[in-house]
Image (cartoon, grey):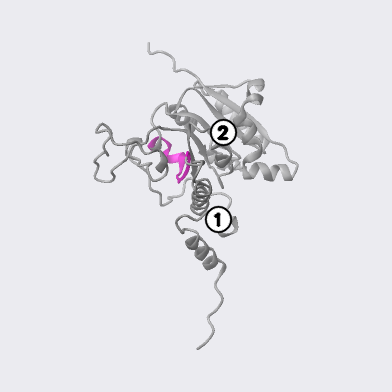
Amino acid sequence: MADQPPPSKRQKREDYRKAHKVEGSAALPKKKFYRQRAHANPFSDHQLTYPASPELMDWASYYPAYIAPPTGLNEPIDHPETRTRPLSREITVADIGCGFGGLLVALAPKLPDELLLGMEIRTQVTEFVQDRIKALRNQNADSGLYQNIACVRANTMKFLPNFFKKGQLSKIFLCFPDPHFKARKHKARIVSLTLNSEYAFAMKPGGVVYTITDVEDLHKWMVKHLEEHPSFARVGKEEEAEDECVQTMMVETEEGKKVERNKGEKFVACFRRLEDPPWP
């Protein structure tokens, strides 16, 4: 019988990820088995699953520790496509383009009373973050740490309002987004007049949008477009410097660590969601 050829790199990655799905595994996943391109085209027709409306999203499998106990008033919602199980609290923090989940993991113990959601468009990167969270939960089963974070594969440029209702979020993080250097690609940037209106819709007054990048041109772009939007006002430098989330964002994301190693510069800007003006 002829010898079987050695498995390809792709096959090795697939075999590793399948083996890592063992229930109760506390071993952290290794990035090299979840490799994917650095960026994805948000305008491509990705095969995504998303709810028709926020009320139809079943978050129970993402936050099992926060499933609300049955009371007769919160029975599952009957719908031909899903039966949702309500949580005891709402998601209030979104990390859009969460990458490998460094910020989520760092913020989990700092915001213990909040539910945080990472949103990532790349399939294998999303899978890595989900496996990472499962492992951390298993490592900290006694303390219950990391039960308040989860990750979902989503294209927020198209479907953000499908996940969050009006005024739901208190924090949105936009950390080291794709700079899309070419002018013809600027329409794919994660900050724009249209997208800012969607962020404003999902945020409650007083909430904060956090932005950070190592590309000065993109920083100026994000500042310009958020300052021009009537629903946002820039947070002062002193308040920004004292914000624990800003301090965490500066050092805990994978991209931020890479910039640190390369001795690059990081540009930060935060914007507060203003109250809507009264109707005339």
Q: List x then y, in percent, for residue 279.
A: 38, 13
Task: Single out the residue that lies furthest toward the bottom.
Answer: 1
Residue that label 1 marks: 27
Nearest to the observer: residue 179 or residue 240: 240
The answer to whether residue 16 shows anywhere in this view is yes
Picture coordinates of residue 158, whole percent (x, y): 43, 40
Give above or below for 36 relative to 207: below
Q: Which mark is residue 110?
A: 2
Q: In the image, residue 121 lies at what x, y percent?
A: 49, 47
Q: For the point 55% across and 36% down, which residue is it?
A: 109
Q: Which residues are magenta?
A: 148-162
Instruction: Give the CA separation, mark 2 to mark 1.
Output: 23 Å
**Relative side of 243 to 144, left or right:** right
Q: Looking at the image, which is closer to me, 136 or 247?
A: 136
Residue at image location 52% in from the left, 51% down from the top: 135
Asked if residue 188 lies left or right of residue 213, the reply is left
Q: Assess whether residue 15 is covered by the magenta stretch.
A: no
**In percent of the image, x 47 and y 41: which residue is there?**
147
Mark 2 element type: loop
Q: Most extreme residue toward the front, as rendered? A: 142
